[in-house]
Image (cartoon, helix red, strand yellow):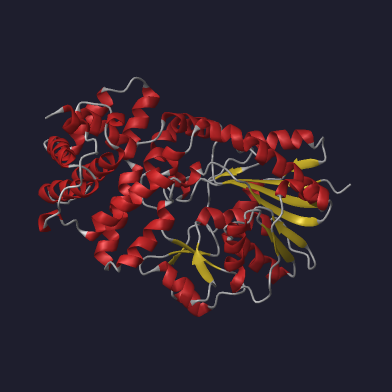
Amino acid sequence: MSDHTQTGQTGAASPRHTPADFVQPARRIAYEVIAAVRESDAYANLLLPTRIQRAALNTADAALATELTYGTLRMQGFYDRVIALAANRAVTAIDPAILDVLRLGAHQLLATRIATHAAVNESVSLAKQVGSRSATGFTNGVLRTISRSSAEEWRDRVLEGTVNADDRLAAEFSHPTWIVRAFRQALRAEGHEGELADLLAADNMAAKVNMVALPGLATDADRERLGLADEFSPVGFVLDSGDPYHLVTATEGRVRVQDEGSQIAALALSRARPIVAGERWLDLCAGPGGKAALLASEARAGGAELVANELVPARATLVRTALEALPEPVPVWEVDGTTIGHTHPDTFDRILLDAPCTGLGALRRRPEARWRKQPKDVADLAGLQSGLIDAALLALKPGGILAYVTCSPHTAETRAIVAVAVRKAGGTVTALDTAAVVQSFSAANLDLPADTGSVQLWPHRHGTDAMFITLLQRSAD
């Protein structure tokens, strides 16, 4: 091969396609989504369903496209190490479009039952469509090399090249090393550091389809459409089959898709104590609106009123859509949440602050986030998180309750933010026994540490996203 062929660079004129270049629709869609994630920071969980629907894929092809997309994105780090070994060069020397083809092909060869000839031949056809003629030879050579060894053999070769324990875990479970270290620290805070490998493995498993039946709105007939009740959430279900979005439409939004951890986070606030009619509640960072809908239905049942706030107009539109299932309109503000303490001091009985965060707790559902986020993102978000929690505490009425929630277990986004806010409040704010509150409405034992003042849910222990929840109460004086 020439150097041009070995690096897989594009640049030659596009070759003439033949019938043999046909790429099965599921593979084509998977490639397009993976490429869009790389090129334009697209979200696979939003783009993939649209592409599947537009292509009118049958059930089997839709399932294949989903597996190829998510499986490739989850294991991208591992596959890159395999490809580097098979190609005998760094992946940074490979044209990005061809690298996406190789990642997709590697997933088919190492993690599915797809026949070797189908995986290789269609990958070569795909490379011919997105790259040069020389790139097709490079793709064929690399994938043929990968196909000659088993997945276990490649695992052993990859792990032989790691430099320390964290790098080994990062390679085996396909996570950036900095995330491995952050997860270790978060587990250590609970005395569960030994569960790190289990957590990383859980991130690479497909998440269940969780549904919520909005209290006071969902009917018995709505619930009969759903599967088994969730293990913990008293209003949640696991959908065992069928199209969840069809159910959302059929029930006019009275049931909807929502992770069980998100349900627990909202219920921790609404069920922290009995609701008093006339209470005012605020969802401070409400987009895209799932927790707001659950809170609004809980508030309505108890005679309270919810206001939702979302600064970003596009996300505020999503919140309004999410709240359409409520019989009465729910106000949606579009204001800077960090100013709410000054514009509306001593106003709300309960506030949910689902703070903007890195989203490291939802890597099962958004696997590309592990490659998109960087350590500096944690530091960049800390100022915003601190500003929001300070403002929320000022907006509470005396005796009011704040739920600080993140979909990230990173201690710099969770315990550290709460500790600083409580210290700055100078004795006017106390942490409630959040574990006791959550356990009081949970349908099963969550096995939560009882002395931390917070709740950290985990994919490997609870089957939820890694939601962090702390309940803070402003003093009544």
- Rendered location of residue 307, percent (x, y): 72, 62
- The answer to whether residue 156 is seen in the rendering is yes
Residue 79 vertical placement versus 284 (above, below): above
Residue drawn where x is 54% and y is 39% of the image: 409
- Rendered location of residue 76, percent (x, y): 32, 39
Residue 367 vertical placement versus 298 (above, below): above
- Rendered location of residue 212, percent (x, y): 52, 65
Which quadrant holds residue 429?
A: top right
Q: Is residue 120 left or right of residue 203?
A: left
Which quadrant holds residue 74?
A: top left
Residue drawn where x is 71% and y is 64% of the image: 306
Image quadrant containing the N terminus: top left
* Residue at the farthest front position: 13
Residue 161 vertical placement versus 245 (above, below): above
- The answer to whether residue 294 is seen in the rendering is no
* Residue at the farthest right position: 477
Residue drawn where x is 82% and y is 35% of the image: 426
- Rendered location of residue 55, percent (x, y): 30, 66
User: Which one is nearer the viewer's eye here, 432 or 291?
Assistant: 291
How many numbered tags mark residues here?
0
